[in-house]
């Protein structure tokens, strides 16, 4: 399957992305976990380049220092090629059911340990668990949801 994706980022990242491709974001502070995020055709109703630009602007804000980390941003357009068996589409009823079952078990386990679920909880915990336990057949899974998407590395160009 082929998608056209839009990725908003700091303008300083352009040269590295164009010469070495996208670099996967790492850590637990991402909605779908580690990866590269795009707005893609066929899912988002709004202007994709505007959504990607707004994402880049939002990511520029540093909550700790209460200022912008950067003021110049770009939107890159990428052609993304995926094997259909690697896509875990949350718009699919069965996949959505699997995701919610795992999420509910994780949330129950957190509550059973007496921990409070707050803003630190991210669904990336669920996606990581699904991958680690191989609940879904592919190790390098791609997640599709209505607004934010996660993809592996593919070619790109600047808008």
Image: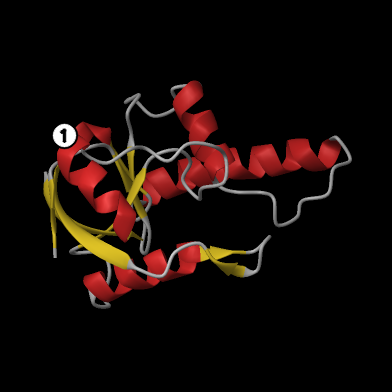
Q: Is residue 90 left or right of residue 42?
A: right
- Judge whether 74 appears above or below 113 on screen: below
Quadrant containing the N terminus is: top left
Disc 1 crowd rating (10 Å Cα; few below 14, some 14-19, many 20+) is: few
Q: Quadrant of residue 148?
A: bottom left
Of 129 and 101, nearer the camera is: 129
Quadrant containing the C terminus is: bottom left
Q: Is residue 127 left or right of residue 103?
A: left
Disc 1 secondary structure class:
loop
Q: How many marks?
A: 1
Q: Is residue 120 left or right of residue 31?
A: right
Q: Is residue 156 left or right of residue 23?
A: left
- Residue at the image point whose x is 64% and y is 64% from the top: 63
Of 23 and 126, nearer the camera is: 23
- Residue at the image point whose x is 77% and y is 39% from the top: 110
Q: Which residue is mark 1?
A: 83
């Amino acid at each position: 399957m082929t998608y056209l994706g839009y990725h908003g980022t700091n303008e300083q990242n352009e040269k590295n992305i164009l010469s070495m491709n996208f670099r996967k974001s790492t850590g637990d502070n991402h909605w779908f976990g580690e990866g590269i995020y795009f707005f893609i055709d066929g899912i988002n109703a709004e202007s994709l380049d505007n959504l990607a630009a707004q994402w880049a602007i939002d990511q520029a804000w540093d909550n700790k220092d209460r200022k912008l980390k950067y003021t110049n941003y770009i939107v890159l357009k990428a052609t993304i090629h995926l094997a259909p068996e690697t896509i875990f589409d949350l718009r699919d009823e069965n996949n959505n059911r699997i995701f919610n079952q795992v999420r509910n078990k994780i949330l129950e386990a957190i509550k059973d340990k007496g921990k409070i679920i707050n803003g630190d909880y991210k669904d990336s915990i669920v996606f990581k668990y699904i991958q680690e336990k191989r609940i879904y057949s592919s190790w390098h899974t791609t997640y599709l949801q209505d607004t934010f998407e996660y993809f592996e590395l593919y070619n790109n160009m600047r808008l």
